Structure formats: C-alpha cells, structure tokens
Amino acid sequence: MTSIISSAAPARAGRGNAWTVILCWITVMLEGYDLVVLGAIIPTLLKTHHLGMTAGDATMIATLSLVGVAIGAVSVGPLADRLGRRRLLIGSVVLFSVFTILVPLAGSVGMFATLRLIAGFGLGACMPVSLTMMSEHMPVDRRARASTLTMTGYHTGAVITSLLALQVTDNWDVLFYILGVAGIGVAVIQWFRLPESEAFVLAKEKAEQRVPFTELLKPAYLRAGIGIWVASFMGLLLVYGLNTWLPKLMNDAGYPVPAAVTQLLVLNVGGVAGLVVGGFVADRRGIKGTTLAWFGAAVAMLACLSVRMDSDILLNVVIFFTGVFVFSAQVLVYAYVTNFYPAGIRGTALGSASGIGRIGSIVGPTITGALVTAGIGHPWGFYFFAVVAVFGFLAVLTLPRSVRNPQEDLDAVA
C-alpha cells in the first residue's frame, strides 16, 4: 500500500490542488445527477409498465436506493481513515458506475432494485470522501468554502439530469448509460491525476493511530457527535423533503403547476447562491455562528411559505432565500466536521454525519407525502419543515465553539 500511496503522493503545488478540486467537484456532480435520475424516469417506467412495475414498486426502488446511499456513507469513513481517501474514492466511483450501467439490463423489478441498492453503496461513499479530500487540500481558513464549493456540483448534476431527461423522453436507459460511462471515465482520470490527501499521508508518516467508529462515542467527541448527527439528519430531511414535494405543496396552495415547477428551479438556484455565500461568510465569521444564522433564517423562510402570497415576485424571493439558507445550512454542518476533527478520524466522522443524515433524506419525503395524502400538505408541510429547522438550530447550538489547533494536519498546504 505504501508504494501505491507514494505513487500518488500529495502535491503541494497548485496543480495537485487543482486536480483535487476539479475531480472531487465532478464526483459530487455525478451524485447530484443520480439524485434526480430515478424521479425523472419513474413516470415513463409506470406508463410503459416496464417489468410490470407499479407505483409501489417504484417507491420501493427509490427507498432502497437511498438506503444504499446511507449504508455507503456510514461504511466508507473508517475505511478512508485506514486505507486512504484516494483509493476509496476511486473504488466508490467504479462501484456505482458499473452497477448503474447494469440497471437498464435488469430482467425483473427485484433485480432493478438490487442494482440500485448496490450502486447506492458506492454513490453514498463518494460525497463524504470528496468533502474530506477537498477540505484537506485547502488552507484551514478556506475549509468552509471547500465544502460549499464542492456541493455546488451536487445541484449542477441535478440540473443536468433534468435537462437530459427532457431530451431523451422514453429512451430512459440512456440516462443510466451516460452516468455509468461518465463515472468510469472520471475514475480513470482520478487514478492518474488525483493525489492522496496530504493530511492522511502526514498522519501515516507520524504513525498516527487509526481510530474506529466507537471513538466518536468517547467524551472528547460525543457532545459534538450528537449535535452533528441531529443537525445533519434535520438538514437532509429538509433538502430532500423540499426537493421532492415543493411543487405539490405549492400546487395545493393554489399556484398553477407550471409556476410550482418553476419555483423548484428558483429554490435550487438559491441553493447554489447560498453555498457560495455561506462558505465565504463561515470562513470569515466562524462556522458555528454562520450555521446557526443559516438554520435560523431557514425557520423564518419556511414559516413564510405557509402563507398564501398574491405577489409572484414576493413569493419567488421567499423561495429563493429558502434555498439560500436551507441547502447551505446542511453543508455548513459538514464544514464544521472537517474543521473540528483531526485527520485520523475525520473521514469516519464525516461518513457518520452523511450516513445518519441520509436517514433524514428518507424520513422527510415520507412524512411530507403522508401530509399531502391526508390533504393537509399546505400549510402543514411547511409548519413541519419549520419545526425541523428549529431542531437543526438547537442541535448546532450544542456544538463546541472552539476547535482543535488546525496546525496538526494541514499546515503544509497553506
């Protein structure tokens, strides 16, 4: 393993950092692409009765996909802290790419679901490892921006899928082939161009002990860990709940369907803007304080959406700022993780935060869907989201404000 790591030794020059930024961003973009690909093709699958698929089957497949992502996110952390970020990221990209290519070839609903589950293992590992590598290749005073910049790729991928889905119509299998082939291509480039995390290599040279997941439960990390897990759960619940049900909630409020779909676009544009601004503010003003402000503002924006507005301009402004604060609040939690934990446990901590957050990504759409089914999606859906944001705020409030001395792992990168 030493020879492999040495061959991809971290480059202190700008070129190594540039490749890390580009390749990690593209990897997260692929996950964003996958975020909406299933939702984009479900109407076609049901209309054509592909494999005899029913609405219940589609729900099961979507749920198993998210379960796979959650398992992958939790599992990859300890491996990344033991074997290295680079190898785990490349392996994860290859795993989800291969099984994504196989999805259109499935001969039954059960096989379709199984392939999506296994692809989810690799996909779920990509984001925490990418965030870890990005943060460790950036100077300490830019770690929040490293996390938020990386996550703009997530929303970019979602937009790309939406645009492609409009073009391919019934040829839905093309969407999976594009994703799988693109992933394999990215993995090949990563093998030759992606340097190992310098923080990981420095920790290895110092014979720093790799710690198990149970280390997160010890007194030194427990308070931060609980706060991070709760905040991540609430944050991803909001992200997935809104992305899944916003058009329906707004339609139930009396807005026409085209306007409701446009509002989803406005929400995600606000999300990209919030990621850029949030990272910059957090690096200058402190990550915890900024995250608190973002969750607090999210509470206000979500409460406002529960009120029917006659002005389209006012409504779109509120939706835009909802995206600004909701989407980047969750990512700022990840930024806190990369800044709080030392290199030897950082991958494990970020993987656990992402994995537990993924449970929220399953719970959010499920509860909101139940409210819609009961006929009270508006305004109670937004009341529910506002309360979730309050819990996110309270969770961040419990986090330690002071962090360890950052000199211990990335001094050389600055």
Image (cartoon, helix red, strand yellow):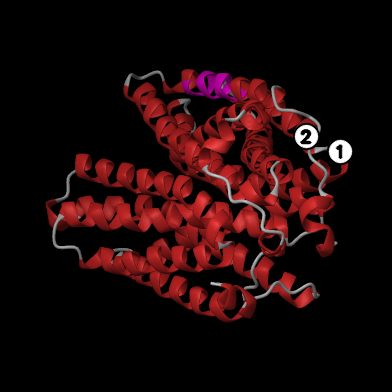
What residue range appears in magenta? 381-389
Spot the residue most to the front.
207
Q: Is residue 100 left or right of residue 259?
A: left
Q: Position of residue 181 (x, y in %)?
A: 41, 75
Q: Are marks 1 and 2 in contact (CB under 8 Å)?
A: yes
Quadrant of the rendered image containing residue 252: top left
Return the residue at label 2. Answer: 290
Q: Dot 1: few (<14), some (14–19), or many (≥20) neighbours within 10 Å?
A: few
User: Looking at the rendered structure, which numbered label has been put on residue 285?
Assistant: 1
On residue 365, which mark appears? Answer: none
| Local secondary structure at mark 2 | helix
What's the residue at 17%, 52% (across, down)? Answer: 110
Q: Is residue 297 above or below residue 99?
A: above
**Position of the C terminus by quadrant:** bottom right
- Tell me the CA gap for discs 1 and 2: 7 Å
Tag 2: amino acid: Thr
Q: Amino acid at mark 1?
A: Arg
**Image-based side of 139 in relation to 119, left or right:** right
Comparing 183 with 134, the one in front is 134
Answer with the quarter of the image where residue 224 lies.
top right
Q: Look at the picture and state if 403 lies above or below 106.
A: above
Q: Per the image, is 385 magenta?
A: yes
The question of residue 285 being in magenta is answered with no
